[in-house]
Amino acid sequence: MKNILLFLIAICWLCISAGAQDSLFAPSVNYQTGNRPSSICAADFDSDGDIDLAVLTIDPDWFRMLMNNGDGTFQAAVNYGVGGDPTFVFASDLDGDGHKDLIASMFEGSVFIRYNDGDGTFDDWYYYPYAGEYSYCAIASELDGDGDNDIIVASILGWVTELRNNGDGTFPGYSQEIYVTAAGSRSVFPIDLDGDSDNDLAVANRWSDSVSVLRNNGDGIFVTINYGAGDGPRSVFAYDLDGDQDNDLAVANQYSNDVSILKNDGNAIFDSVVHYSAGIQPFSVFAADFDEDGDGDLAVANYSDDSISVLINLGDGTFGPPYNYAVGDGPCSIFAADFDGDSDNDLAITNDLSDDVSILMNLGCPYTPGDINADRQVNCNDVVCAVSFLTGGGAPPYSCNCPPFEFPFYASGDVNGNCAFNGMDVTYYVAYLKGINPALLYCPDCPPAR
């Protein structure tokens, strides 16, 4: 086999470059929302088993509810009023009835809540005026160990305010706590960062180029540590990106046009940061498994070039170059969920300047037959990668989840189309590079971007 490897290296002059970009998402389909949609979230609001959309618009100030038809298409928006100057929308069951309610942060320092009637209508509402001035984000999570969802609000003045739930979806003024972060706090994400089973907080601070990590003592009391990010952090998302069973941080940096990855050491310590290019002015980042290989990828909304960037995880928390997809004008908020019921993650993006939402449907496992080393080319380097893997070397970067095949299935290496990756594929590949075989094939039960 070593002789075969040397032979393959020697024939590299025969290599051809396909240069094809895998298409993971279909072209966007846009739905009108009304003026200036600034934030989006998704949940099954009407209890019919599919995922609907809630969009916040700021001119006028409304929740716009787009209900799913069951196939990933959406009905015309139904509107519910919000108080003045809303900045962010989030869905959470606040009153314990099993239905997702809606929360909006308000720039002047309040929180506005609409309670779900259970069928996706939101007739009852409440207004809490004491969340902190210049609020840009409000998110709910269980913070104090009593089993209900509390609210945390980020203010650009450099603090977060915790509003503790009474247990019935009300938030008395005396139950608030304020914690200092850093200047320009715009985004907050609640999750367990230190492995002690309570929810900590990560906060993106736009004016101080930092991320604040607030560690929960277990009773909703927090201690803050700040870490550097890129230039103008605007959005933060937590996910186990490197597969080591703790949650890392991804931060969209508006002014450095990149995403910062901060790896967790398991104790909520984030001493190293790596930056990956995105588009122009990344406003929002979301992590999910888009290519169905079991790790967390990234989707980024790029406000100034009307695109989103998808960065595929190479399996260890490092990322390949971005795949860019066109959306509407001024994409500013992004959310991933399975909208069409096919078990993969689709994308929804609000477009601030074109007054609509872009929906991008996930096409399935994205690979180019023969691009085994995932460099977006098809050539003899992939054959070398295949031989290395088949003789005990490292696995190819990308794999597919294609039942009934055992996961991981390295579909890009199955170039003879027999639904297995072995030495026969190497022989077939070499013959293709020599011009003997006319094309690289793929497994019919696991087609690319199926």
Image (tube, grey):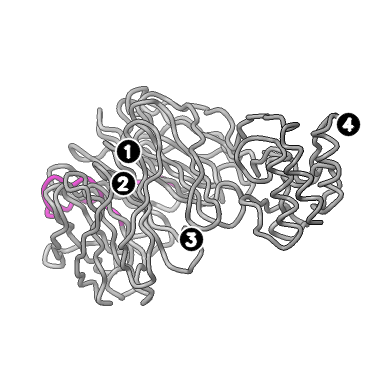
Q: Is residue 206 above or below residue 326?
A: below
- Report if the CB atoms under discs 3 and 1 are less than 8 Å apart: no
- Lower position in the chain sequence, tag 4 or tag 3: 3
Q: Which mark is residue 23?
A: none
**Dot 1 surroundings within 10 Å: few (below 14), some, or many (20 or more)?**
many
- Report if the CB atoms under discs 2 and 1 are less than 8 Å apart: yes
- Report if the CB atoms under discs 4 and 3 are less than 8 Å apart: no
Q: Position of residue 437 (x, y in %)?
A: 87, 33
**Residue at the disc numbered 3:** 242
Residue range highlighted in magenta = 120-139
Q: Position of residue 197 (x, y in %)?
A: 38, 75
- Lower position in the chain sequence, tag 2 or tag 4: 2
Three-letter amino acid code at the position of disc 4? Ile
**Residue at the disc numbered 1:** 283
Question: Of discs 1 and 4, which sits in the foreground?
Answer: 4
Three-letter amino acid code at the position of disc 2? Ser
Three-letter amino acid code at the position of disc 1? Phe
**Residue at the disc numbered 4:** 436
